[in-house]
Image (spheres, helix red, strand yellow):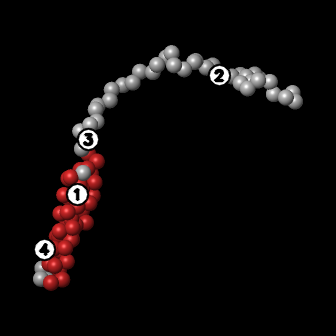
């Protein structure tokens, strides 16, 4: 988060300096370099912020399924009636 905020601060300064360079001092090349920097820095900041792993995270390994947790279900045949879970249905 600090890197992102630092990058956004640099972007803001670059934008302000670009306005000053282009509008007041008429430094065309310096002004456009600062504009390009102000446009590219948000992308770089987001990529760097997403690329770093947080300090509290751990590497996860493969997870094996718990075979005793879920019953094994076999597929139902098309001519077979579904089992009634809530008792008999009235009107049959």
> Residue 10: x and y, percent?
17, 63
Q: Nearer the viewer, residue 76 or 14?
A: 14
Which mark identifies residue 30? 4
For marks 1 and 3 on the same chain, the one whose residue lies earlier in the sequence:
1
Q: Name the element at disc 1.
A: helix
Please give the residue where the numbered disc 2 appears in the rendered image.
75
Image-quadrant location for residue 60: top left
Q: Is residue 78 above or below residue 47?
A: above
Q: Is residue 52 above or below residue 5?
A: above
- CA–CA distance in space, label 1 to label 4: 24 Å
Badge 2, how many Cα within 10 Å: few under 14, some, many 20+?
A: few
Please give the residue where the numbered disc 1 appears in the rendered image.
5
Q: Residue at 80% of width from left, 24% of height from top?
A: 88
Image-quadrant location for residue 25: bottom left
Marks 4 and 2 in Cβ contact (< 8 Å): no
Marks 1 and 3 in Cβ contact (< 8 Å): no
Please give the residue where the numbered disc 3 appears in the rendered image.
54
For marks 1 and 4 on the same chain, the one whose residue lies earlier in the sequence:
1
Q: Which of 70 and 79 is in front in this view?
A: 70
- CA–CA distance in space, label 4 to label 2: 71 Å
Q: Which of marks 3 and 4 is in front?
A: 3
- CA–CA distance in space, label 1 to label 3: 16 Å
Q: Is residue 82 visible?
A: no
Seen in the image, is 30 located left or right of residue 42?
A: left
């Amino acid at each position: 988060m600090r890197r992102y905020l630092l990058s956004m601060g640099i972007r803001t300064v670059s934008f302000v300096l670009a306005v000053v360079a282009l509008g007041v001092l008429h430094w065309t090349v310096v002004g456009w370099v600062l504009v390009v920097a102000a446009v590219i820095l948000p992308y770089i900041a987001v990529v760097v912020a997403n690329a770093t792993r947080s300090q509290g995270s751990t590497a996860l390994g493969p997870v094996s399924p718990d075979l005793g947790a879920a019953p094994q279900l076999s597929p139902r045949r098309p001519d077979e009636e579904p089992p009634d879970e809530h008792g008999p249905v009235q009107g049959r």
